[in-house]
Image (spheres, grey):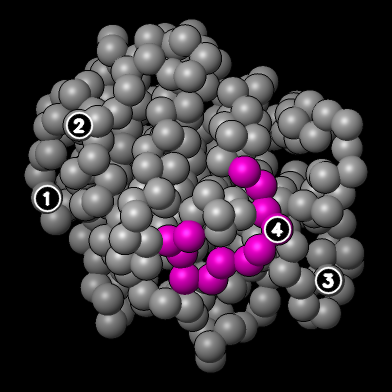
Amino acid sequence: MVQYKDDDYGSFGGIAISSDLINQADIILQSIPYESGTSGKKGTSFAPSALRMISKDMQLISRTGINLSNLKLVDKGNISINPINGEFTRKSIYQSMKYLLENSSAPIISIGGDHSITFPLIQALADTEKSVGIIWFDAHRDLLNEFLNSKYSHGSSLRRCIELPKIDPENVLLVGTRYFTSEEEKFLHDHGIGELKQSELEKQLNPIDLMSKKVQEIASRVDSLYFSIDIDGLDPAFAPGTGTPVAGGMSSSDFMNLINKLPVRIRAFDLVEISPSLDPSGITIKALLAILTEILAQIKISYEI
């Protein structure tokens, strides 16, 4: 049995049920307060507790009118991590995710933490499925081979995922990118990784429809989809509480429109790089809660719950 730091939060958004009932869950939530893979300002380890704190204000009807009150959400709490032992933490994340995937068909939402947590999450999914597609919403590509003397930092997480044997680079789509390095540019083109840069999206008459079409194309080629959401994919005006903000991003409204129009089932999501301490106004954590609400609505529709 996977061990969690906290046994049962029990009241996330007013819709959580016992953490032991994963076989009865419509949706499973877990959190990973790990930030040792980040290069920017710290604070992402506080995002899970901040999110739970404001979840009492969560709207149980989404902005598109989907009633969420009957959803059975299991909140498993914090995965056990060690802030000075990355290998232990990656193993703990992997084991937790693998356990949930093998014991429940419910979609899984993981709250970080920094973006380095995503590699072991996707590694676990790849070890339980024949093929996996990845949607990566981020200002950065995260394709560096090594960053800060580590191959497992948040700047290398997508590259580690693409090295997994069940991840075909053609089934990976970067969305909203606007910060580039020559190393990542070469790796992306050499491996045929899909990308919708923020500048390209802004030229489109219907950018949300284009993104939805690209996601559907990937979904048609794989057994399972993973959607990783870095809050710095949003413009800092809408999400200032992040360690590596990049100007010129998507609005929170446009991103929620994308979530609303996702035409396929997503097996797992993560939401990362939120630093509440960098945003005294609370705009960023509120944006996270709003995005999470729309994810729950998308899951309810796509899984026909």
Is residue 107 visible in the rendered image? The answer is no
Q: Is residue 151 above or below residue 217?
A: below
Callouts 4 and 1 close, C-beta under 8 Å:
no
283 left or right of 298 in image: left
Give the amino acid type for the residue marked by disc 2 in the picture. Lys
Main SS type for the magenta part? Answer: loop
Q: Residue at x 47, y 36 (%)?
A: 291
Mark 4, residues whose alpha carbon is within 10 Å: few (<14), some, or many (≥20)? some
Which one is in front, 198 or 34? Answer: 198
Task: List the residue tagged with mark 3.
Answer: 185
Using the numbered discs, state the Cα–Cα distance from disc 2 to disc 3 in whole angstroms: 43 Å
Which of the two marks, 2 or 3, is nearer to us in this view?
Answer: 2
Can residue 243 be found in the magenta stretch? yes
Task: List the residue tagged with mark 2.
Answer: 56
Can residue 109 be found in the magenta stretch? no
Mark 3, residues whose alpha carbon is within 10 Å: few (<14), some, or many (≥20)? few
Which one is in front, 86 or 16? Answer: 16
Mark before the other along the chain sequence, 3 or 4: 3
Mark 1, residues whose alpha carbon is within 10 Å: few (<14), some, or many (≥20)? few
Q: Is residue 189 above or below residue 186?
A: above
Mark before the other along the chain sequence, 2 or 4: 2
Is residue 64 visible in the rendered image? The answer is yes
Res 248 label: 4
Using the numbered discs, state the Cα–Cα distance from disc 4 to disc 1 in whole angstroms: 38 Å
Q: Position of residue 234 (x, y in %)?
A: 59, 51
Q: Position of residue 152 (x, y in %)?
A: 50, 75
